[in-house]
Image (tube, grey):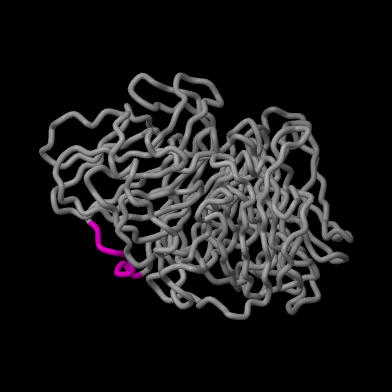
Amino acid sequence: MRNRILCAVALSATLATSQTTLNVVAAPGTATFAPGVTGNAWLFNGTLPGSTLRVTQGQTLRVRFRNDLPESTALHWHGQPVPLGMDGVPGVSRPAVAPGQEFVYELTNLIPGTHWYHPHGHAMQLDMGLAGLVIVDPANPADDPPYDVEQVVVLDEWSNPLGGFYTGHLLNGKSSDGQIPIAVQPGQRLRLRILNASAVTNYVLALDGHPMTVTHTDGGRVQPVVVQALPIGIGERYDVIVDCNNPGVWSLAAAAITNRSVTLVRGVLRYAGQTQAPPPANFVPPNLSSGALLSYAQLAAYFPVPPISPAPRHRFTATFAMSMGPGGMVHTINGQSWPNVTPFQVALGDVVELTMVNTAASLVQGLHPMHTHGHSFRLLNTAGGTTQPPVKDTILIRSSGQPGSTAVVQLVMDNPGLWLFHCHNEDHMASGMITAFEYLGDTDADGIADGVDHEPTTAVPVTEISDMAADFAPGASGDVSVQWTAGQLVDLFAGLSELSTPLVFPPYGTLVLDPSSAAFFGGAWANASHRAIVSYAIPNDVGLIGLRIAFQSVGLTALPGGFRLGTAQALTIR
């Protein structure tokens, strides 16, 4: 009888919206930094940096992620206002993905521009090579500036955490000696999509012999600004246009923001027909060492954005500090270290003004690239004024006493949940420099508060499995946990296959499990902690290794229709 629910849904459903499905696998591998120079790494799809994921605005991006690493991990979609359950922060949005297991990220309402994906909350994983770009092309190509040639530029430092023969800085996964030149023709317009994927280094980038015209920051288009050198904090992205009107072979050089007189890594721009040797790896272009830097104050949004409000609902202050504790350096926001923090409490629709104040005077340790999850912010005190402020998701706050040691931003709270606000320096984050925005209320009326609901905008049961590899071996036992309304019955269905295209069945949810091969697996009542637990035991048979079982929950509810289809989650015996 229970299986008829799934069959009825399948008969009444409609196709999901336009979508692109891409596969991402995280696994150990080997990176080649230069000819004959290799090192061990953890890689997305076997490359450093990882595969670039590209879709068009308006499409849903489904990423089938498999974790073949020896430890759990998750994917954070930096710069995209995804639903909380897709944000990739273990313990906040979903459990991490266990070794040998998978998770399908469903990313909707993607905003155009240059963004990226990386692990979150797992020490050293970003250092080991796990980062890749997400490019969302605008639905209307005319919304982008014209260009002829495109090149991604991913900056990173390599600290050799897994062993190998190279320690230093990388551009597109290569040392200076391993660079493949960017090839251009005279007269072409070159678009560079630049990402700082470093764990601890804030860079300055310059192209010898050429100014750069900044067209985007953190994915958002801005009024063009011509600069000689570009500071780029950890996690920031800039798109620039280069007018290729100076034939030659040129250095695209990066230095630390704290020492512009030393080139850490450089790429090469080569015009057609130019055969001379590239500049030496240690060459410091004049505009890198002394060219005028881009300032946030120069930026203004290109397209209309919500104006700065003279009367925000909340005014919060985030004060950054650092001190030496018993275990080493401690970094705090408002005197607190994660997870022992008091979140900024907000409600759906609030306009929040946040003032960031840095009290750390160290020129190196005092730099804080601050990032908001699930939201972008509008930056005050810029060329955009109150009507066209630039929109960003990451901002580099300078050391106390330096220009840029404070900043004021406004956010529209339009994405319910519990969202991190943190420094993107991995050392600072690991030593506590994280707090959160916590939404009050229950947006989807499912009886689970937004601050703890793993799907706060959609009233659906959330199906989850363990992040421990041992729970999926032959002979092991474990639980499938479903987050749902306390006191309501949850049924769990299992099958060996899923629909190639999920079917949407308003208002009941989305059918993922193939009902023709699904069977009732078990049921449980959701407890006071909003958890329905269905246990399993795997036979002690090595012949089962590799068997993949998909689960989807169905929860009863007092909401219209009487039940809701839950999210799907696969389990693979390893």
Q: Residue at position x 72%, y 33% from top?
A: 328
The residue sitting at 29% across, 31% down in the picture is 283
Q: Main secondary structure of the magenta part?
A: loop
In the current view of this chain or complex, which residue is farthest to the front? 401
Query: Which of the image's four quarters has the C terminus?
Result: top right
Quarter of the rendering occupied by the N terminus: bottom right
Residue 362 highlighted magenta (yes or no): no
Describe residue 99's horizontal placement relative to residue 253 as left or right. right
Above or below 247: residue 295: below
Mark yes or no: residue 21 visible: yes
Q: Whole-percent x and y of residue 389?
A: 46, 70
User: Where residue 53 sits: x, y (%)?
Assistant: 43, 50
Residue 144 belongs to the span the image colors magenta: yes
Q: Quadrant of residue 564?
A: bottom right
Q: Where does the image place residue 240, in percent across and percent down from the top left?
A: 32, 55
Q: Nearer the viewer, residue 542 or 279?
A: 279
| Quadrant position of residue 573 | top right
| In the depicted structure, whether residue 522 falls above or below residue 428 | below
Q: Residue at x 30, y 51 (%)?
A: 228
In this rendering, position of residue 147 left or right of residue 314: left
Question: Which residues are drawn in magenta?
Answer: 140-147
- At x 13% / y 32%, what residue is drawn? 275
The x and y percentages for residue 194 are 39, 49
